[in-house]
Structures are given as C-alpha cells and as structure tokens.
Amino acid sequence: MTDAVIAKDSAEHFWGGVRMALGALRPVQQERVPAYGQAAIARQIGMKPRLGARIEEELTRAWQASAEAGVSMSLLVIEIDRYREYFACYGKGATDDCVMTVMQAIADVLPHDDDTCLRMGRATFVVALPDMPVLMARTLAQKIAKAIRGQGLAHKESHAGTVTVSVGLAVSNPQGGYDRTFFEAGAQALKKAQRRGMGRLEVVDLRPAQEQRRKAA
C-alpha cells in the first residue's frame, strides 16, 4: 500500500499527521559515521582531519605484508602544489574536479591492481607500496608527477603554469607491528620537498637507522 492510498482516507490522514507530529518530538539517534567518512565531512566544512582510519588500515596492512615477506616497503605522500592559490583562483567546483583528476592520474600509474591511492585532507594523497624497493618507488613517483603534468590542468597562480605535485618518499624494512613514525617520515619528506620548490621529490630511507638499532639491541 502506498502513501497516496493511505492519504485517500481522511481519518487515517488525520491520525497519520498526529503520529508524524509526535515522532518529530522524539530524540533522533545520530548515525555513527566511519572514521574515513568523518574525514570527508571535515573536508567539506573546512576542518583539518586527522589521519583517517582507512589510511591507517591500509598502512598497517602493507606494513604487515612486507614484514611477513621480509621485504622493503615504500610510502608516497603526495600533495598538489599551491592548492590554496588554485582554490582562490578557480573556485570550489573546478578545484574538486582538479583533485579528482589528480587522484585518478595517480591511480592509473600504480603498478598493481590492489595498490590504492587514498586522499587525506584537501589535496594530499597517500600510497602504500609493500614489496617496493626504493629505486622502483622513486621511478614510480616520477611517473606520477609526469602523469599529472600531462593532464595539462591550467594553474595561473603557479610558476609552472599547470598543476604539479610534490612527493615525499619514505622507505623502511618493516618488522613487528606497524610503526606510525613511518608515515611521519613520509610527511616530513613531503614538507622538505615543498620547501625546495614545486614538483619536487624528497626521499628518506629509514633502513640504515633501523639496522643500527637492531644491531645495538
């Protein structure tokens, strides 16, 4: 039976209105939103989200896979250069389109089907790469930067004239449980790359320090 059928009976229509009014007085139970959903909402209202649960989950998965296999893991932290200036110049709609184009360009050059590009904040992307040696990861970062330049997205507030990205690359030999300082190292490498200019790549290799600590232990 449809709402239209119910509305044909005037008495039922009256009591239906009463029930609706009473229902409006009841407290509404707030639906629980996943952590990565909260990050998306935070972006929409201009808040700075924390590292999302989905990204933590992906980093932990890649770390554990690399630790079990006894291989290196690489991490790319990628950010659109001069994002704020782009937003101020082109507006929200064009900026959203730009971000999605960049994200897709990154995903298109990832080497494995299960590799994932995850968005963090407004214009930052995270790619976890288990079993990825540093030289291959460096080459991949360069391919990503080239693919994004190849999109030809105009950015008149950038000296490059088009949208570019800077990349922080961190490399580790995972052992034990996931170490959150690994992501921090990648984020710091990104900041260092951005201080050098636009379209830059900065690499931090944590393996020598890890090996020294293991020998000392």
Image (cartoon, rainbow, N blue to C red):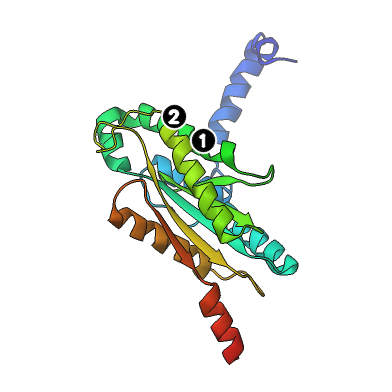
Q: As shown in the figure, which amino acid type bears the numbered disc 2? A: Gln
Residue 52 visible to the viewer: no
Q: As shown in the figure, which amino acid type bears the numbered disc 1? A: Ala
Image side of residue 129 versus residue 90, left or right: right
Q: Secondary structure at mark 2?
A: loop
The picture places residue 11, in percent across and down from the top left corner, at 64, 15
Label 2 and label 1: CA atoms lie apart by 8 Å
Q: Residues within 10 Å of mark 2 (few under 14, many from 20)?
A: some
Extreme residue toward the top, this view = 8
Image: 166 above or below 208: above
Residue at coordinates 33% horizontally, 33% vertically from top-left? 162
Residue 60 appears in which quarter of the rendering?
Answer: bottom right
Q: Earlier in the sequence, mark 2 or mark 1?
A: 1
Image side of residue 196 versus residue 208, left or right: left
- Numbered-mark total: 2
The picture places residue 20, in percent across and down from the top left corner, at 57, 28
Residue at coordinates 37% horizontally, 40% vertically from top-left? 164
Residue at coordinates 46% horizontally, 65% vertically from top-left? 204
Image marks 2 and 1: residues in contact by CB distance under 8 Å: yes
**Where is mark 1, residue-wise?**
105
Residue 141 visible to the viewer: yes
**Where is mark 2, residue-wise?**
151
The picture places residue 79, in percent across and down from the top left corner, at 41, 47
- Residue nearer the viewer, 103 or 10: 103
Q: Secondary structure at mark 1?
A: helix
